Image (cartoon, rainbow, N blue to C red):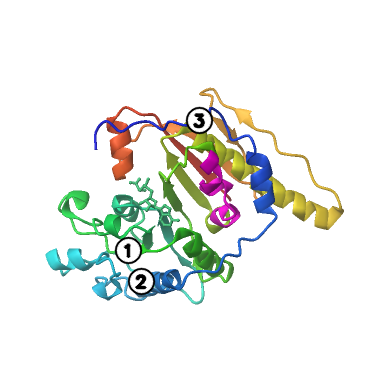
C-alpha cells in the first residue's frame, strides 16, 4: 500500500475540550449493554487461554476457530506438529497472563507480539471479518508456523475490554501488555469524541494493563492520548483524595525532554507516560508498513503502571 496519505484534519492542535470531556468520563461508568456476540467471542478467547495454559507443551487445537475461519487452523494444515516449546502450568489460582492486540486488523502484529512473548497467549481482536480472514497467511508468517500462543477473534472492543477488565478485577487474568496499534484517528473535529481517549471507554482501556502501547501516524492523536491518560489518573487521584481528605491534589507537572517529547515519571500509584516518535526497523502491522513506506513520522505512547 505505497503512497499512504498522512492524516489531514481541521484540527491543528490538541482538541480544545479534551480535558473537560476526559474528566467527565473519568467520573462516570460506561453502561452500554454488552452485545451477545462479543460475550460469545470473549468466551472463545477465555477458552483459548485456558487451553493454552493447560496444554502448554502440546500443539494448540483448532477447535477454537472463530466464525471468520482464523486462529491456528491454517498452521495446523501446514505443520500439524507445532509445539509451543514452553512448559507453562498455571500455578494454583494465580491470574493467567494474557496479552491483547486491540484493533489488530489483518492480525500481523499479533504474530510479532506472540513471538516476543512466547509464553503468554496473545489475543488479536478486530470487528472486521474481512481483515481477520487474512490473519496468519504465509506472507505474514514468512512461511513459518503461526505461533501457538496467537489467537484471533472477531469482537467489539468497547465490549471486549469491559469483559476483560472484569476478569482482571476478579484476578482471573492479568494483562502485562496491551497493544493498540493505529486505531482509527477520526481526524475531523466533529468526530473527536469517537477517538478512544475521548470516549467513555477510556478509563477501562487504561485500567486493563500494566503497559499500554498506542501507535499512530498522527502526532495530535498521540499527544491527546498521552494528555488524556494524565487527566484520567489525575481525576482518579482527586476522587480518591477527596474521599480520604475532603480535598483534591494538584495536577502533576509534565516535563519536556530534549527531543521535545513529553514524559511524566510515575511512582507506584501514577503512570509513566512516554510520548515519542519512533522509526520501526521492521514494521509490525499493515498500516505501519504503508505509513513507513510513505515516509511518514510514526508516534507511540507507552503508559506504564508499576
Ligand atoms: C486503521 S486499522 C489498523 C489495523 C492494524 N492495527 C494495523 O495497524 O494494520 C484499525 C482497525 O481497528 C478496527 N476497529 C476499530 N474500531 C473497532 C472496534 N470498536 N471494535 C473492534 N475493532 C475495531 C478496525 O476494524 C480496523 O481493522
Give the Cα distance between marks 1 and 3.
Answer: 38 Å
Residue 187 is left or right of residue 263, and the answer is left
Residue at 33% x, 52% y is 105
Closer to the N terminus: mark 3 or mark 2? 3
Q: Which residue is mark 2?
A: 48
Q: Is residue 61 magenta?
A: no
Answer with mark 1 or mark 2, whichever residue precedes in sequence: 2
Q: Is residue 111 visible?
A: yes
Measure the alpha-carbon separation of dots 3 and 2. Answer: 43 Å
* Location of mark 3 (residue): 10
Q: Nearer the viewer, mark 3 or mark 2?
A: 3
Residue 27 lies, in percent from the top left, at: 70, 55
Secondary-structure class at tag 1: strand
Magenta residues? 190-205
Left or right: residue 57 compared with residue 275: left
Residue 294 versus residue 195: which sits nearer the camera? 195
Which of pointers 1 and 3 indicates the residue nearer the eye? 3
> Does 112 sit above or below residue 265?
below
Which quarter shows the N terminus?
top left
Q: How many residues crowd around disc 1 within 10 Å: few (fewer than 14), some, or many (20 or more)? A: many
Q: Of 270 and 239, which appears nearest the observer? A: 239
Amino acid at each position: 500500500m505505497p503512497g499512504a496519505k498522512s492524516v489531514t484534519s481541521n484540527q491543528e492542535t490538541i482538541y480544545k475540550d479534551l480535558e473537560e470531556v476526559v474528566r467527565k468520563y473519568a467520573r462516570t461508568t460506561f453502561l452500554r449493554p454488552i452485545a451477545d456476540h462479543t460475550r460469545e467471542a470473549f468466551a472463545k478467547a477465555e477458552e483459548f487461554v485456558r487451553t493454552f495454559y493447560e496444554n502448554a507443551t502440546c500443539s494448540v487445537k483448532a477447535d477454537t476457530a472463530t466464525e471468520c475461519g482464523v486462529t491456528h487452523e491454517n498452521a495446523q494444515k501446514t505443520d500439524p506438529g507445532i509445539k509451543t516449546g514452553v512448559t507453562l502450568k498455571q500455578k494454583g489460582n494465580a491470574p493467567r497472563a494474557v496479552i491483547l492486540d486491540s484493533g489488530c486488523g489483518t492480525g500481523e502484529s499479533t504474530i510479532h507480539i506472540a513471538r516476543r512473548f512466547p509464553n503468554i497467549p496473545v489475543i488479536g481482536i478486530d470487528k472486521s471479518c474481512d481483515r481477520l480472514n487474512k490473519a496468519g497467511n504465509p506472507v505474514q508468517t514468512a512461511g513459518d508456523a503461526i505461533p501457538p500462543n496467537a489467537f484471533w477473534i472477531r469482537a467489539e472492543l468497547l465490549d471486549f475490554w469491559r469483559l476483560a477488565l472484569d476478569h482482571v478485577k476478579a484476578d482471573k487474568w492479568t494483562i502485562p501488555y496491551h497493544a493498540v496499534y493505529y486505531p482509527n484517528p477520526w481526524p475531523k473535529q466533529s468526530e473527536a469524541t469517537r477517538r478512544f481517549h475521548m470516549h467513555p471507554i477510556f478509563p477501562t482501556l487504561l485500567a486493563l494493563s500494566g503497559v499500554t502501547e498506542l501507535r499512530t501516524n498522527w502526532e495530535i492523536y498521540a499527544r491527546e492520548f498521552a494528555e488524556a491518560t494524565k487527566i484520567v489518573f489525575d481525576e482518579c487521584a482527586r476522587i480518591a483524595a477527596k474521599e480520604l481528605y475532603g480535598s483534591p491534589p494538584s495536577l502533576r507537572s509534565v516535563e519536556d525532554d530534549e527531543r521535545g517529547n513529553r514524559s511524566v515519571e510515575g511512582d507506584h500509584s501514577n503512570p509513566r507516560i512516554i510520548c515519542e516518535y519512533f522509526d520501526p526497523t521492521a514494521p509490525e502491522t499493515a498500516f505501519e508498513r504503508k505509513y513507513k513506506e510513505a515516509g511518514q513520522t510514526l508516534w507511540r505512547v507507552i503508559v506504564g503502571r508499576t
